[in-house]
Image (cartoon, helix red, strand yellow):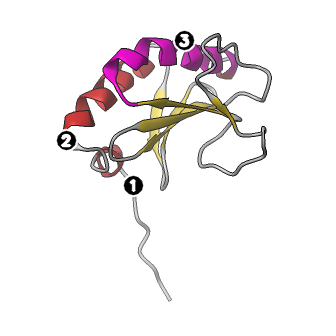
């Protein structure tokens, strides 16, 4: 018995976004790659961004991109308290790490990048 192996692409994920939200991905993608030595790896449920290991996973919905940050609970400095900590209460999720930040508008990207950079710093070491 043979079964076909589906190869997932970034385009498969971006297609889930409403057309007016594609620019949101483009800006995030650009900023993530500009961190330096970052690989974009499409998976079945998300697109992983890796330095030495995953630091951020983008999960695409019609009107938003959810970003899981590969940090343990208590490791993130989030002064605006906009992230979800999946350990309080314990909650399952796609992607790696204990935190999620949701980006719906371009204006939210700069603060999201401050959070993402914390996960990137840990992943590249």
The residue carrying mark 2 is: 19
Residue 37 horizontal side relative to residue 74, left or right? left
Residue at 35% x, 44% y is 10
Distance between mark 3 and mark 2 Cα atoms: 26 Å
Give residue 78's quadrant in the image.
top right
Distance between mark 3 and mark 1 Cα atoms: 28 Å
> Which residue occupies the foreground of this view, 6 or 24?
24
Label 3, residues with CA under 10 Å away: few <14, some 14-19, many ≥20: few
Residue at 80% x, 22% y is 74
Is residue 53 in view? Answer: no
Please tell me whether mark 1 or mark 2 is closer to you in this view.
2
Label 2, residues with CA under 10 Å away: few <14, some 14-19, many ≥20: few
The residue carrying mark 3 is: 114
Q: Residue furthest left?
A: 19
Tag 3 secondary structure: helix
Residue 82's disc is none
User: Sequence order check: which comes first, mark 1 or mark 2?
Assistant: 1
Tag 2 secondary structure: helix
Residue at 57% x, 24% y is 51
Instruction: Reply above or below: 106 against 114.
Output: below
User: Sequence order check: which comes first, mark 3 or mark 2?
Assistant: 2
Give residue 75's quadrant in the image.
top right
Is residue 6 in view? Answer: yes
Residue at 58% x, 17% y is 115
Instruction: Reply above or below: 101 against 117.
Output: below
Q: Is residue 118 magenta?
A: yes
- 3 and 2 marks in contact (CB < 8 Å): no
Residue 8's disc is 1
Q: Measuring from the top left, give residue 120's x and y in whole percent.
A: 60, 19
Q: Which residues are magenta?
A: 104-122
């Amino acid at each position: 018995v043979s079964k076909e192996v589906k190869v997932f692409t970034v385009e498969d994920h971006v297609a889930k976004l409403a057309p007016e939200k594609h620019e949101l991905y483009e800006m995030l993608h650009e900023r993530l790659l500009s961190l330096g030595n970052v690989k974009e790896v499409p998976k079945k449920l998300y697109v992983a961004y890796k330095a030495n290991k995953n630091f951020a996973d983008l999960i695409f919905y019609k009107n938003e991109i959810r970003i899981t940050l590969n940090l343990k609970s208590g490791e993130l400095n989030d002064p605006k308290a906009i992230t979800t900590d999946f350990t309080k209460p314990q909650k399952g999720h796609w992607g790696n790490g204990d935190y999620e930040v949701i980006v719906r508008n371009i204006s939210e990207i700069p603060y999201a990048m401050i959070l993402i950079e914390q996960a990137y710093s840990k992943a590249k070491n």
